[in-house]
């Protein structure tokens, strides 16, 4: 199968040195969903918001799944590489620094961001993972030599993921060299104001 382009919205900050927030929506979302959230991180950032190329009963996703929380890992592998190929292409086209991309994903979007972290640890300059799940049942060997910062929030009432799997995923990312800031919030699968406030604080402390 050949890589397909992803639908996207790009908003330039006007500063060629700027970081770019790569916005990755949840299941059933699209490239418009996270623009306001992305803008809330500050006007000094470029925003690149993309739509997943997979359709599940009319709902866009970033990769196929076989059931709730059961991922089609072959497709996830392919889609992760497709997203990377797209990033390299769009960085050149839009003129942003591909080495300064910070992924921000919610749910399914956080899961493809996680797949990027473990498959291609040299690509992202950071990641915000809201309500993620471990993307591959068995993770590949990976090392983040740059100790890339990762912000991670789970919900302690989230029915979509087992608490012990979340702990194991956090530990694996730490072991692979990522610099984790993780919170288990009193929340379900939905994003809350607390997630966003904590992510803003982390971002300001880490990148400004
Ligand atoms: C979702 O609803 O998107 C799941 O919780 C996560 C996924 O399928 O990637």
Image (spheres, grey):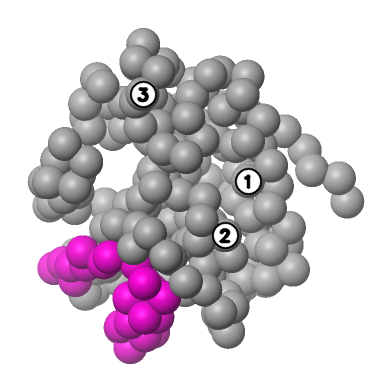
Disc 3 vs disc 2: which is toward the camera? Answer: 3
Residue 120: assigned label: 2
Within 10 Å of the Cα at label 2, are there few (<14), some (14-19), or many (20+) other Cα atoms? some
Position in image of residue 7 (x %, y %) = 63, 29
Position in image of residue 194 (x %, y %) = 12, 52
Q: Could you say which is closer to the camera, residue 100 or residue 56?
A: 100
Residue 193's place in the image compared with 208, above or below, is below
Circle 3: element type = loop
Position in image of residue 145 (x %, y %) = 42, 65
User: Residue, x 48% and y 30% (percent of image)?
Assistant: 97
Position in image of residue 99 (x %, y %) = 47, 40
Label 3 vs 1, first from the N-terminus: 3
Circle 1: element type = helix
Q: Does the magenta stretch include residue 20?
A: no
| Residue designated by label 1 | 84
Q: Does the magenta stretch include residue 161?
A: yes
Label 3 vs 2, first from the N-terminus: 3
User: Residue, x 86% and y 45% (percent of image)?
Assistant: 2
């Amino acid at each position: 199968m050949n890589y397909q382009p992803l639908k996207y919205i790009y908003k330039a900050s006007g500063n060629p040195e700027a970081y770019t927030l790569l916005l990755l929506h949840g299941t059933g979302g699209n490239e418009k969903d996270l623009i306001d959230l992305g803008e809330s991180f500050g006007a000094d950032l470029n925003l690149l918001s993309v739509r997943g190329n997979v359709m599940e009963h009319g709902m866009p996703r970033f990769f196929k799944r076989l059931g709730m929380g059961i991922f089609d890992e072959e497709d996830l592998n392919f889609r992760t590489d497709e997203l990377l190929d797209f990033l390299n292409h769009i960085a050149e086209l839009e003129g942003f620094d591909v080495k300064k991309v910070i992924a921000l994903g919610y749910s399914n979007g956080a899961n493809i961001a996680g797949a990027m972290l473990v498959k291609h640890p040299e690509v992202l300059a950071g990641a915000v993972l809201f309500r993620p799940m471990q993307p591959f049942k068995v993770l590949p060997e990976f090392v983040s030599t740059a100790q890339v910062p990762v912000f991670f929030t789970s919900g302690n009432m989230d029915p979509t993921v087992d608490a012990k799997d979340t702990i194991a995923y956090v530990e694996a990312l730490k072991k692979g060299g990522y610099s984790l800031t993780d919170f288990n919030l009193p929340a379900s699968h939905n994003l809350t104001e607390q997630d966003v406030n904590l992510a803003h604080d982390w971002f300001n402390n880490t990148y400004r």
